[in-house]
Amino acid sequence: MTTILPCPFCGHGDVEIDQVEEHLVAVDCPECGAVGPCDGTIMGAIREWNSAERRTMDNDIFAFDLTERAA
C-alpha cells in the first residue's frame, strides 16, 4: 500500500485522486483546491505529489517548492 502525503499547501490529509484528462490523473486537495502534477498512472501521480518539496514555516503552513525539476 502506498501512502499519499497530506496537501503541501494546507496540510489536509484526506486528498483525492482524480482523472484530469483522458489519460492523465492527479492527486488533489478538496480542502484548498490544490492539484498536483499530472501523470499517466495513479502511482505516478502519487509519486509526483509525494516528491514535491514540503517545508513547514514558522506558522506551520505547508508549501510546495514550485521550481521546475530537471528532467
Image: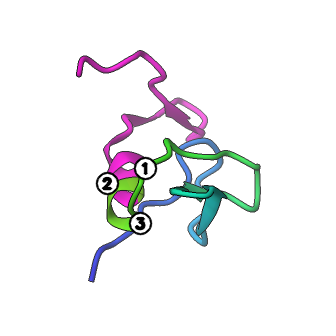
The answer to whether the residue labelled 3 contacts the one labelled 2, judged by CB atoms less than 8 Å apart, is no
Where does the magenta region start and end? Answer: 46-71
Amino acid marked by disc 3 = Ile
Secondary structure of residue under mark 2: helix
Q: Nearer the viewer, mark 3 or mark 2?
A: 3
Distance CA(mark 3)–CA(mark 1):
7 Å
Is 47 part of what is drawn in magenta? yes
Is residue 24 placed above or below 65 in the rendered structure?
below
Residue at the spot 56% in from the left edge and 41% down from the top edge: 60
Seen from the viewer's position, the closer of residues 25 and 64 is: 25
* Badge number at residue 6: none
Q: Is residue 69 left or right of residue 54?
A: left
Mark 2 or mark 1: whose residue is earlier in sequence: 1
Residue 67 horizontal/vertical position (percent)? 42, 16
**Residue marked by disc 1:** 39
Distance CA(mark 2)–CA(mark 1):
9 Å
